[in-house]
Image: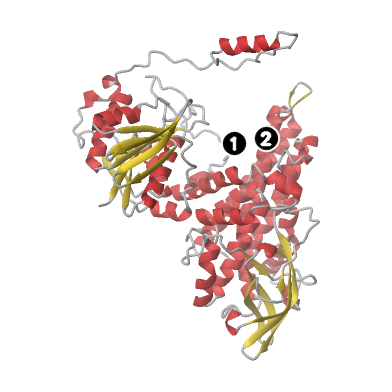
């Protein structure tokens, strides 16, 4: 039977652009071009490699986001994924990670899955907790932050590199896996892939298709609230430490003051 | 956002030319731009200084895997992209270095195009898939030491010997020659000029590299030596007898240069713009001086006029309506303007302009070759002059 892989991807504002909050303190998506989160490209790449190694596999890329989020799906499809699912609903505006994980869980169940792959975090919110919450909602094992991953005989195995040790992990499928930016460079979409992506199916779903009430998501349903946001202060000229015998001490004090050590 | 409801002014695309591109066009451009940023830009100044392109086989395989080799051809493992997409790829490659664009142009528009258009089914199946993947690099031998703009005078001669062909001659200034697995060589025969598919391991064939170049230093340029190279009867390209064969290949490659030259110009313009806004003299950025602004404005005008011209020609090629004279128009204008933009950028960068730390001198010296190869400026003036007056000034 075909190995069903679902890759959860996020459409984020280009981090090289001048990113802003909108008036309601949600992300201003009009001000900056969006793209497929670069950290999610690693998840797409690992899905493609797992699918290549399997006899038979199908990769679905799933995103929750506004109309333009289709661009993120199109990018993943041009890299080689088979089909896309786009959950879009006006009531989703302002949804936090708790709500997003609910929508993703329902959508993953709607698609059907053996393996859910995620990036290690989004490049805009950078919370990194979504894969864990998603696994809880689905009631399946979570194997997070892998820098190496493989699937064989209904089992996912991988390596998690920590500060103190590298752990070898394994779990029975179905499972949720997240991969780091050390898992292997993502491929460039080939021109054939770009042309083929035009013809690949993208299913559009809204909240009612997934049986989710509007008050469970959106700004109103969010468990967290952004109270205030201020622009980061302009960079100052920096501090020059002149070594007159106390240089090492001064450096250490500076690092402590900045909470680096 | 602009209060007038108009789109905001984008210094990278002041005319809004990107609006002419489809999502697929943008995706193709993005793939090539990223590849070049990752794989070429960090190393190219070093390659240039050393005068070599180490890892050219790996680069070719990577270009093959994204689909950039023979990308506008169909079948045989080729991507089947549009002419506009091919042009966008050339622009992004040449924004990195003309040598990399030359590698791709010669592979796709000259060697593969010749086999695709004039070859037998056996020749296409034998070579094109491996050339599209980058496993085999190809070259194209038309120019000779004593015959450049006037290839009709070529002396390389292929003689029938029973069922075989025996070729003798020299080809000069051949991009990719020393690393090629296959050469498309044009030779005089008793039945006119014909093209031959010459495997590089054919006895009597060699391709020594030409050193001591001050241009296209990150590119392999070679001489082809053919001493009694014996080839079977099926080595000849069955179609494309006469000079029209090689000239149609050159027209296709030239079309890519119309775009590519604007890539070199864009990279130099961007370097100059960045420099002008950060370099301070007399207490303020030099971009605030009228003389510098005049240069920047004139550079931007010619750069984006040239890109617009390339788009126009690309759309005509996609519609099957592009005449060779129109390609000459584009090559004449865009390379001439591109080299002027690079030279002006050099003046804005002052002494830093001559350093390999910045791309402008590298692009300017590369364009000295681009100005001459695939039809010199003067030949394109003569082609246009003839088309305008009906009077042939060179034959």
Q: In this view, does A64 lie above or below B216?
A: above
Q: Relative to residue B135, is residue B213 drawn left or right?
A: right
Q: Which structural element holds mark 1?
A: loop
Residue denoted by label 1: B11
Residue denoted by label 2: B273
Residue B287's quadrant in the figure?
top right
Q: How many labels does the image show?
A: 2
Residue B172 position in % (x across, y down)? 75, 67
Residue A54 position in % (x across, y down)? 34, 51
Q: Relative to residue B375, is residue A188 drawn left or right?
A: left
Give me the residue at 39% from left, 52% from top: A52
Give me the residue at 59% from left, 54% from top: B58
Asked whether the viewer can see residue B155, the reply is: yes
Q: In this view, does B171 lie above or below B168?
A: above
Packing grade of label 1 (10 A; few <14, some 14-19, many >=20) is few
Residue B360's quadrant in the figure?
top right
Which of the pair A260/B155 is nearer the observer? Answer: A260
Q: Real-space Cα distance between discs 2 and 1?
A: 10 Å
N-term mark: 2 or 1: 1
**Pointer 2 with pointer 1, Cβ within 8 A:** yes
Asked whether the viewer can see residue A71, the reply is: no
Q: Which structural element holds mark 2?
A: helix
Give me the residue at 53% from left, 62% from top: B132
Residue A218 position in % (x across, y down)? 28, 24
Label 2 chain ID: B
Q: Relative to residue A79, is residue B213 drawn left or right?
A: right
Packing grade of label 2 (10 A; few <14, some 14-19, many >=20) is many
| Quadrant showing the C terminus of chain B | bottom right
């Amino acid at each position: 039977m075909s190995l069903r892989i679902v890759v959860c991807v996020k459409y984020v504002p280009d981090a090289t652009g001048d990113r802003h909050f909108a008036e309601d303190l949600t992300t201003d998506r009009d001000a900056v071009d969006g793209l497929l989160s670069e950290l999610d490209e690693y998840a797409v790449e690992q899905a493609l490699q797992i699918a290549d190694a399997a006899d038979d596999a199908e990769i679905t890329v799933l995103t929750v986001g506004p109309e333009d989020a289709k661009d993120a799906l199109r990018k993943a499809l041009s890299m080689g994924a088979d089909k896309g699912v786009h959950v879009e609903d006006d009531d989703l505006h302002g949804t936090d990670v708790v709500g997003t994980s609910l929508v993703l869980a329902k959508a993953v169940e709607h698609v059907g899955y053996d393996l859910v792959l995620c990036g290690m975090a989004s490049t805009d919110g950078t919370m990194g907790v979504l894969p864990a919450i998603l696994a809880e909602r689905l009631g399946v094992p979570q194997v997070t932050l892998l820098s190496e991953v493989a699937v064989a005989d209904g089992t996912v195995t991988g390596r998690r590199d920590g500060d103190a040790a590298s752990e070898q992990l394994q779990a029975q499928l179905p499972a949720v896996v997240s991969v780091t930016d050390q898992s292997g460079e993502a491929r460039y979409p080939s021109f054939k892939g770009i042309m083929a992506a035009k013809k690949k199916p993208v299913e559009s779903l809204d909240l009612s298709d997934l049986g989710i009430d509007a008050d469970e998501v959106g700004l109103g349903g969010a468990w967290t609230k952004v109270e205030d946001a201020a622009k980061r202060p302009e960079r100052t000229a920096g501090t020059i430490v002149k070594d007159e015998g106390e240089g090492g001490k001064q450096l250490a004090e500076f690092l402590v003051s900045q909470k680096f050590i | 956002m602009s209060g007038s409801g108009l789109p905001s002014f984008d210094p990278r695309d002041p005319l809004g030319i990107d609006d002419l591109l489809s999502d697929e066009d943008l995706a193709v451009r993005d793939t090539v731009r990223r590849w070049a940023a990752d794989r070429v830009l960090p190393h190219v100044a070093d390659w240039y200084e050393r005068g070599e392109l180490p890892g050219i086989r790996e680069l070719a395989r990577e270009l093959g895997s994204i689909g950039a080799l023979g990308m506008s051809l169909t079948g045989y493992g080729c991507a089947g992209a549009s002419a506009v997409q091919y042009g966008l790829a050339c622009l992004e490659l040449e924004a990195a270095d003309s040598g990399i664009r030359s590698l791709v142009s010669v592979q796709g528009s000259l060697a593969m195009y010749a086999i695709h258009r004039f070859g037998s089914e056996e020749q296409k199946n034998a070579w094109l898939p491996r050339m599209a993947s980058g496993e085999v690099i190809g070259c194209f031998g038309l120019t000779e030491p004593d015959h450049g703009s006037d290839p009709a005078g070529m002396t390389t001669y292929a003689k029938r010997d029973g069922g075989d062909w025996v070729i003798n001659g020299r080809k000069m200034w051949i991009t990719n020659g020393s690393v090629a697995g296959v050469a498309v060589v044009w030779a005089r025969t008793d039945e006119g000029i014909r093209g031959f598919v010459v495997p590089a391991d054919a006895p009597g064939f060699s391709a020594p590299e030409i050193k001591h170049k001050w241009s296209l230093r990150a590119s392999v340029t070679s001489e082809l030596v053919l001493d009694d190279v014996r080839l079977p009867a099926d080595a000849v390209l069955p179609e494309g007898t006469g000079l029209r064969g090689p000239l149609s290949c050159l027209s296709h490659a030239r079309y890519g240069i119309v775009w590519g030259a604007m890539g070199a110009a864009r990279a130099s313009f961007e370097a100059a713009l960045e420099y002008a806004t950060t370099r301070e003299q007399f207490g303020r950025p030099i971009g605030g001086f009228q003389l510098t602004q005049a240069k920047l404005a004139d550079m931007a005008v010619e750069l984006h006029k040239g890109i617009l011209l390339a788009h126009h020609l690309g759309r005509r090629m996609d519609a099957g309506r592009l005449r060779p004279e129109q390609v000459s128009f584009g090559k004449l204008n865009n390379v001439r303007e591109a080299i002027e933009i690079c030279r002006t950028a050099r003046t804005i960068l002052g002494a830093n302009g001559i350093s390999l730390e910045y791309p402008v001198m590298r692009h300017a010296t590369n364009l000295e070759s681009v100005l001459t190869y695939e039809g010199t400026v003067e030949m394109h003036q003569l082609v246009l002059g003839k088309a305008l007056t009906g009077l042939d000034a060179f034959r």
